[in-house]
Amino acid sequence: MSEVNKRPPWDEYFLKVAMLVSERATCPRMHCGCVLVKDKRILSTGYNGSIPGDEHCEDVGCYVVDNHCIRTIHAEINAITQCSLHGISTKGAIAYVTNMPCTNCAKTLIAAGIIEVVTFSDYHDTRAEEFFGKAGVRIKRLNMPEKIINYDLENYISAKK
C-alpha cells in the first residue's frame, strides 16, 4: 500500500487479518493464522494452539513427536472447528493462511469445501499442493502484506471538526 489512506485489496486485507490472528498462537515452533472467508465476509478465524483446557506450549514446552508438536491444533483446523461449533458452512469459502497448509490441514480444507487458499509463506511439506491440485483447489501466493496497520485516527478527528 503506497498511500496511508488507500484501502487494501481484499486479499491483502484478509491476509493481514490472518497475520493478526496468528499473534494468538501458543506454540513457539510456528505462529500461524487462518481466516475463512465467503462472499467477502469472515466466517471464522483460527490459530495454532492447544485443545481447550490443555496446557500451552509456550507455558510448558512443546510435545514433539517425529519433529512435530502434537499438542497443537493447527490454525486451519481451529478455524474449521469454530464453523462447526456454530453451524456455519465452509462450502465454497476461501482460506487465508499465513503459512502454506500442511498435508493434513490441506486434506481437511478440501473436505470442508474450501475452493481457494491464499497464502504468502511456504511450508516444508509439499504434499498439500498435490492434494489441492487433485481436488481443484486454487492456490494463490502473494507477497507478505505490510506488517503495519494504517490506523488513521488523526485524519478522522480533524475531519469531524
Image (spheres, rainbow, N blue to C red):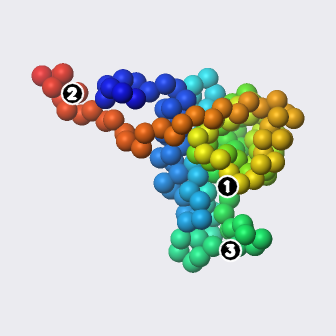
Residue that carries the numbered disc 2 in the rendered image: 155
Is 3 or 79 nearer to us in this picture?
A: 3
Residue that carries the numbered disc 1 in the rendered image: 74
Q: Is residue 59 above or below residue 144?
A: below
Residue 67, quarter of picture: bottom right
* Residue sitting at x 33%, y 35%: 150
Task: Give the alpha-carbon distance from disc 1 to disc 3, as whole Å.
Answer: 14 Å
Q: Is residue 12 left or right of residue 36?
A: left
SS class of the residue under badge 1? loop
Residue that carries the numbered disc 3 in the rendered image: 63
Q: Residues within 10 Å of mark 3 (few under 14, many from 20)?
A: some
Residue type, numbered disc 3: Tyr
Q: Residues within 10 Å of mark 1 (few under 14, many from 20)?
A: many
Q: Residue furthest left?
A: 161
Task: Give the alpha-carbon distance from disc 1 to disc 2, as whole Å.
Answer: 39 Å
Q: Is residue 75 left or right of residue 6?
A: right
Q: Residue 75: x percent and y percent?
A: 64, 51
Residue 90, quarter of picture: top right
Residue type, numbered disc 2: Asn
Q: Reading the chain from its start, which is encountered first: label 1 or label 2?
A: 1
Q: Quadrant of the N terminus?
A: top left
Residue 130 in view, yes or no? yes
Q: Residue 125: x percent and y percent?
A: 75, 53
